[in-house]
Structures are given as structure tokens and as C-alpha cells.
Image (cartoon, rainbow, N blue to C red):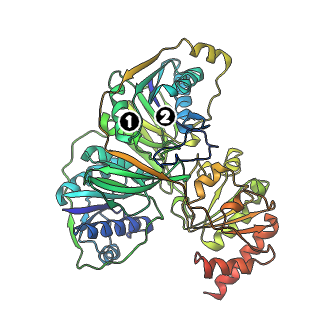
């Protein structure tokens, strides 16, 4: 019996979202007086192994290949779950997680809770988990019937806590090929380079129509660069093709949950707020002191973006220079 | 192609979400329900694909009660040929996926489209479950598709980028924003929709695995602290010392 976590390895190590899932799994296993196993891709390095051991993982199952496509992840997780007798499976609710979790839950015949934002509580006949619903306009308490389940946890919702329990063993996961013909051929993957993916970013700088045109986005990008932040935008901005649609945050775009969200020249329509209101700290910059964004912001600046942005960027740079 | 489009209905995006006093349900008073925006893109793309191939059939399917029928008529006004409503409460993703799979198994569909998630429960689970139940490939969070009826070229969002792939029909795909623009029904479509078939079928499975016990509104912020636009050093030090985010 074990809790099983899917821990994709990137560039040889475990990145933040994988670490969150592992830490979540270890805490869950601890509450069940069980242990935590992880499934990693073949490239797991000594450094990654060290990370797993420090978090308190008992067993690292190494896949025979890199776990890039959904079919092999689901296949390998199914095998790994049976090998360790996993009753609870944990996956970060990234794009990959969103593709894997529903298939896996059906294949294992387990209930699925997606978008989990709190540690699960044991209930009479299973589990209770809290998840965001209505695009962050509310929370739902979901009752899971039964002891076993797949949990897809919301990124940036859980701390990464060390819990050294001993040595983390590593074993190879030999997976029998299921012999099925591949009907799905991925030809290429274009990765955004040199930019922090929005869904993984701890800090996000976002702008709206107040920026007046795409030619002014260098102001947003400079501030983002100074903060190691990702850039985002409002729906009108992506609709007008000032910025690519994958930067659109809001109810019909991406829902994000960074530590810091800076909104520049965005009035704060309810659809936009829905996508960002779970951010830990919100800073709103707007010329209109009645802008709805100030109602959900922690800090507000009434001022012109073209005046405030360069000054804020300079202030961040001064701060970094003095704290370097 | 013979295309099945799965529709759900959701509160309009401008809705102020209020829960009933006992916290057990959404207060539906004055809430307008619309076709889930991602599902509307799925429907539009289904119509575009068949137009480009010079023929085919688009069926919309919905799991829900009779109050959703105006949205199913709207889907037919946009261009769907027929609608099927499974008469059940859509409360649990696996329950919905199993009902949809039962409908999908009754015919030979070349393509099954869903939205990437519903904007109410945001689970994003039904498309993947449906693909698994039917044993079909899944293109999740699809941003473009072109098809010759036998094989499709697709692109879809992956973490930190975009993937391009070839998939043989039949398969399941969930639709992302960039896929297309929604279509507005015209008067002719609205008239024609009145006589298109809307079949109601009884629920076939009882597979509920989860249940929402209660809801809670988000905690309101304690108030906004205004910082002088001329003093950005103060903002930076607040973000560092008080909020600890930089």
C-alpha cells in the first residue's frame, strides 16, 4: 500500500509543480501511515533522487523511456499503481495532468477529484476535498465515495515541505508493451524559450487596453523581466491580437494562481477577476480610481501606466541591486 | 464526417455567483444559462469541418434536464442537424462521461468534440474520461484542426508550448479558445431549428463517484492599500517586507 505520485522530470530535475505534487503525496501518505512512491521518467538524475529523498519519498520507480506522451504516462502509471498497490494517485493539474488524470481514473476505476486546492480530509465513506468552481467565484466541497481516488492538484496551491524518512529506493519499472498500434503521432512540439510559462509562474505582470497598443508592451516586458515574472493580458487585448491568446487570463482564458499578480490598465471585469482572484497578492495600476480591480487588490496605484511602469521597473531594479 | 458535439450549459460569464442560504446549491435566481463557451467553439468547428469536406452530419448531445432545451435549439439554430438530451442531472463527471459514451456507442462517429472544460465546475475531466471509455485517442486542449475525413492534422496546448500531431479518425478532442470564433445564429437558422429533431433519452447508468456537499464564496479581501504613484520604492518594500512576494 502506497500513495503514488506522478513526478515528471525536466532537464534532469524536479521542477516546482512536480515537487508540490510529491510533497502533497508524502503528506497524504503520512496521514494514512503509509508511504509515498513516485513514477519518474528515465532521465532522473542524482540531483532529482536527492530531491525525492529530502521530501520523504520511499520508492522511485523509473520508467524505461521519457514520459512525454499521454498514452505512455497513463500506461506506466497504471502498471506502477498495481506494483505498489496504490490506492491514492496524485498528479499536478498541468496540461499534461489534465490529459492524464481522467484517463487514468477511468482505467483504474477510481473516482477523480480535479483542481484540488486543500489537503484532503478523511470522511465517513471516503474523502472530502475542496476545489475552486465557477472560475474562482466560489469553492465546492467534493465528497469522494470510497477510499481510493485520483487527485489532480491545482498548481501553486501547496507548500514544498521536507520530511526526511530515510533512503529513497530506486527501481526500474519494466512495463510490458500493450502491443497497440499508435494512432496518434506527435510530429513536433514548439516550446516557448526564454519565457516563464504563465501557468507555472510565481509572479505575473498583466496588462489591458490601458496600454493603448501592442507597441507599448515593452514596458510590461521590462517590468516582468525585472521581477522574473511571466506576462499576461486581458481578453480584449488577445481578441484584438495585440498579444497571443495563450496570454489571456480570465474566465474563458487561463485561470492562474501566482504569488503576485500585477494588473496594469485592466478595469477588472468580473470575467477577468474570475481568472486571477486566487492570486496571493494583487497590485492594480489604473488611471480610474473607481476601477473595479481596486476592490480585489491588496495594493492600488492610481496613475498612468506610461508613467508608473518605468518607475516601478526602476524601483524593482534598485531593490534587487541592493539585495543582491 | 459524422460528428458528435457534447454540450453543457453554464451560467452566463457575467453572472455574480451566489449560493443558496444552506450552501448546498447555486442560487439560480436571475441566472441566465448559456452554452458553455468552449463547447460553442466545438460546435462551430464541427460545422466548419463538414463545410470544408462538403457534407456530413453534426449531432449535439447534452446531459441535463428540460430547462436546457432552449440552448439545444440554439445549437441547432447555429447549424447542428439534431440534438439528443439525456434526461439526468449532470452532477458528476464520470456519470456524464458514461452517459455520453452510451450515446456515442449507438452510432459511428468520426469525431467527438467537447469543450476543454466547463466554465462552471472547471473540472476538465469529461473529454478525457469519454476517450478512455470509448478506447479512442484524445487530443486535449486542441487549438487547430484540419481533416480529410480519414486523418486529421491537429495542434494542441502542452505545458510551456504547443504540439502538432496527426491523428486517425475516430478520436475525441477537447476545444481551446483559439480554435475558431463562435457563430451567431441567423433568422433562417432559428426558423429551421424549430423543426429539427430533439430526442430525449432516459439516463442509462448510475455511476456517480463524487458529490458536492456544499459551496462557499471566496473570502473577501480586507481592502486595498493605495500607494502614491510617485513612490514606487514604497510599493516594492511593501511587496518585500509585508507581503513577502519579492
Which residue is under mark 1?
B96
| Residue drawn at x 32%, y 69% as measured from the top left | A27
- Of the numbered discs in the image, which one, if any, rests on residue A246? none
Q: Residue B5 location, x and y as percent?
A: 47, 29
Dot 2, crowdedness within 10 Å: few (<14), some or many (≥20)?
Answer: many
User: Which of the chains bears the disc numbered 2?
Assistant: B
Left or right: B117, with A181 as reference point: right
| Residue drawn at x 60%, y 39% as measured from the top left | B12
Q: Is mark 2 on a helix, strand or loop?
A: loop
| Residue A142 visible from this viewpoint | yes
Left or right: B151, with A247 as reference point: left
Above or below for A263 versus B239:
above
User: Which of the chains bears the disc numbered 1?
Assistant: B
Above or below for A28 versus A135:
below
Q: Residue A295 location, x and y as percent?
A: 69, 61
Figure disc tally = 2
Q: Which of the two labelled residues, at mark 1 and mark 2, occupies the earlier sequence position? A: 2
| Residue drawn at x 56%, y 61% as measured from the top left | B219
- Of the numbered discs in the image, which one, if any, rests on residue B8? 2
Nearest the viewer among A283 and B146 is A283
Amino acid at each position: 500500500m502506497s500513495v503514488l505520485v506522478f513526478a515528471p522530470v525536466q532537464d534532469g530535475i524536479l521542477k516546482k509543480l512536480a515537487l508540490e505534487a510529491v510533497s502533497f503525496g508524502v503528506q497524504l501518505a503520512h496521514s494514512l501511515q503509509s508511504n509515498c512512491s513516485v513514477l519518474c521518467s528515465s532521465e532522473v538524475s542524482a540531483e532529482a533522487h536527492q530531491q525525492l529523498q529530502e521530501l520523504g519519498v520511499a520508492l522511485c520507480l523509473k520508467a524505461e523511456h521519457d514520459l512525454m506522451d499521454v498514452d505512455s504516462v497513463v500506461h506506466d502509471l497504471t502498471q506502477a499503481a498495481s506494483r505498489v498497490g496504490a490506492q491514492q494517485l496524485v498528479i499536478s493539474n498541468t496540461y499534461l495532468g489534465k490529459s492524464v488524470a481522467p484517463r487514468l481514473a477511468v482505467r483504474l476505476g477510481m473516482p477523480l477529484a480535479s483542481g484540488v486546492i486543500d489537503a484532503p480530509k478523511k470522511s465517513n465513506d471516503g474523502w472530502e476535498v475542496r476545489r475552486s468552481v465557477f472560475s474562482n467565484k466560489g469553492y465546492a466541497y467534493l465528497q469522494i465515495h470510497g477510499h481510493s481516488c485520483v487527485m489532480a492538484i491545482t498548481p501553486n496551491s501547496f507548500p514544498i515541505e521536507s520530511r526526511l524518512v530515510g533512503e529513497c529506493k530506486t527501481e526500474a519499472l519494466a512495463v510490458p508493451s500493450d502491443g497497440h498500434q499508435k494512432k496518434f503521432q506527435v510530429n513536433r512540439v514548439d516550446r516557448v524559450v526564454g519565457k516563464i510559462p504563465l501557468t507555472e509562474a510565481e509572479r505575473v505582470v498583466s496588462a489591458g487596453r490601458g496600454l493603448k497598443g501592442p507597441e507599448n508592451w515593452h514596458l510590461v516586458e521590462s517590468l516582468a523581466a525585472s521581477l522574473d515574472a511571466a506576462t499576461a493580458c486581458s481578453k480584449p487585448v488577445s481578441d484584438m491580437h495585440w498579444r497571443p491568446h495563450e496570454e489571456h487570463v480570465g474566465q474563458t482564458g487561463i485561470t492562474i494562481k501566482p504569488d503576485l499578480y500585477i494588473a496594469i490598465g485592466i478595469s477588472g471585469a468580473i470575467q477577468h477577476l474570475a481568472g486571477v482572484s486566487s492570486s496571493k497578492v494583487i497590485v492594480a495600476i489604473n488611471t480610474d480610481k473607481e476601477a473595479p480591480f481596486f476592490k480585489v487588490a491588496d495594493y492600488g496605484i492610481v496613475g498612468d501606466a506610461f508613467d508608473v511602469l518605468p518607475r516601478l521597473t526602476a524601483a524593482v531594479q534598485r531593490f534587487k541591486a541592493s539585495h543582491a | 464526417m459524422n460528428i458528435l458535439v457534447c454540450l453543457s450549459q453554464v451560467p452566463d460569464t457575467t453572472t455574480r455567483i451566489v449560493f443558496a442560504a444552506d450552501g448546498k446549491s447555486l442560487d439560480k435566481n436571475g441566472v441566465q444559462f448559456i452554452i458553455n463557451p468552449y463547447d460553442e467553439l466545438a460546435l462551430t468547428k464541427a460545422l466548419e469541418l463538414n463545410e470544408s469536406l462538403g457534407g456530413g452530419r453534426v449531432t449535439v448531445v447534452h446531459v441535463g434536464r428540460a430547462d436546457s432545451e432552449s440552448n439545444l435549439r440554439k445549437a441547432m439554430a447555429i447549424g447542428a442537424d439534431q440534438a439528443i438530451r439525456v434526461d439526468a442531472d449532470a452532477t458528476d463527471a464520470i456519470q456524464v462521461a458514461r452517459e455520453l459514451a452510451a450515446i456515442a456507442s449507438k452510432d459511428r462517429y468520426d469525431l467527438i468534440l467537447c469543450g476543454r472544460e466547463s466554465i462552471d465546475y472547471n473540472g476538465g475531466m469529461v473529454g478525457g474520461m469519454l476517450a478512455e471509455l470509448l478506447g479512442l485517442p484524445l487530443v486535449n486542449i486542441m487549438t487547430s484542426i484540419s481533416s480529410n475525413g480519414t486523418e486529421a492534422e491537429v495542434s494542441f496546448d502542452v505545458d510551456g508550448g504547443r504540439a502538432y500531431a496527426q491523428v486517425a479518425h475516430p478520436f475525441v478532442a477537447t476545444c481551446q479558445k483559439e480554435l475558431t470564433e463562435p457563430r451567431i445564429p441567423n433568422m433562417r437558422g432559428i426558423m429551421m431549428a424549430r423543426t429539427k429533431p430533439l430526442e430525449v433519452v432516459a439516463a442509462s447508468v448510475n455511476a456517480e463517484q463524487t458529490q458536492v456537499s456544499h459551496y462557499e464564496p471566496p473570502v473577501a479581501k480586507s481592502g486595498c492599500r493605495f500607494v502614491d504613484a510617485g513612490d514606487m520604492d514604497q510599493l516594492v518594500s511593501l511587496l518585500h517586507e509585508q507581503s513577502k512576494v519579492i
